[in-house]
Amino acid sequence: MIHVDNGQCGLCTHFGESHGGAQLMQIRKNHEAPETLVDECGHPRHASLHLKVTPISGCDGFEEVIMSSSQGHKGGKKVSA
């Protein structure tokens, strides 16, 4: 597992946003991700490119996910998984 910091794709609302899921929730809660994980970036500036990024990638379009208190994190933009 690798540590994911604020500002990196694994904690961005656009990382894997087309499907969400339990794995993304765990990454956002624990700030850790499998080293081999690659997923789509759904950021509007990148959507047409169909970018595949790792949880530790990053860009200037980062938007932090807001997780409910039951999900263990506060701040950023609220999304449902």
Image (cartoon, helix red, strand yellow):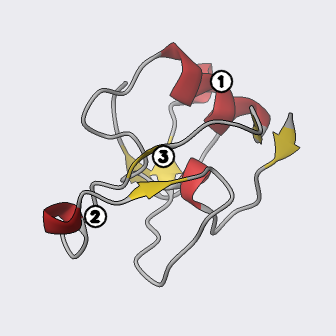
Query: Dot 2, crowdedness within 10 Å: few (<14), some or many (≥20)?
Result: many
| Residue 30 position by quadrant | top right
* Residue at x-position 32% and y-position 40%: 17
On the image, the x and y values in percent for residue 20 come to: 37, 27
Numbered circle sitting on residue 42:
none
* Residue at x-position 51% and y-position 31%: 68
Say what amino acid the circle numbered 2 marks.
His
Vertical placement of 59 versus 31: above or below? below
Closest to the camera, between mark 3 and mark 1, is 1
* Residue at x-position 59% and y-position 52%: 54
Closest to the camera, between mark 2 and mark 1, is 2
Vertical placement of 79 versus 14: above or below? above
* Label 2 SS: loop
Q: Earlier in the sequence, mark 3 or mark 1?
A: 1
According to the picture, the residue beneath numbered tag 2 turns out to be 43
Quadrant where the N terminus is found in the figure: top right
Query: Dot 1, crowdedness within 10 Å: few (<14), some or many (≥20)?
Result: some
* Residue at x-position 74% and y-position 32%: 34
* Label 1 SS: helix
Query: Dot 3, crowdedness within 10 Å: few (<14), some or many (≥20)?
Result: many
According to the picture, the residue beneath numbered tag 1 turns out to be 26
On the image, the x and y values in percent for residue 76 come to: 48, 58
Question: Left or right of 19: which side holds 7?
Answer: right
Q: CA distance from mark 3 to mark 2?
A: 16 Å
Say what amino acid the circle numbered 1 marks.
Gln
Q: How many marks?
A: 3
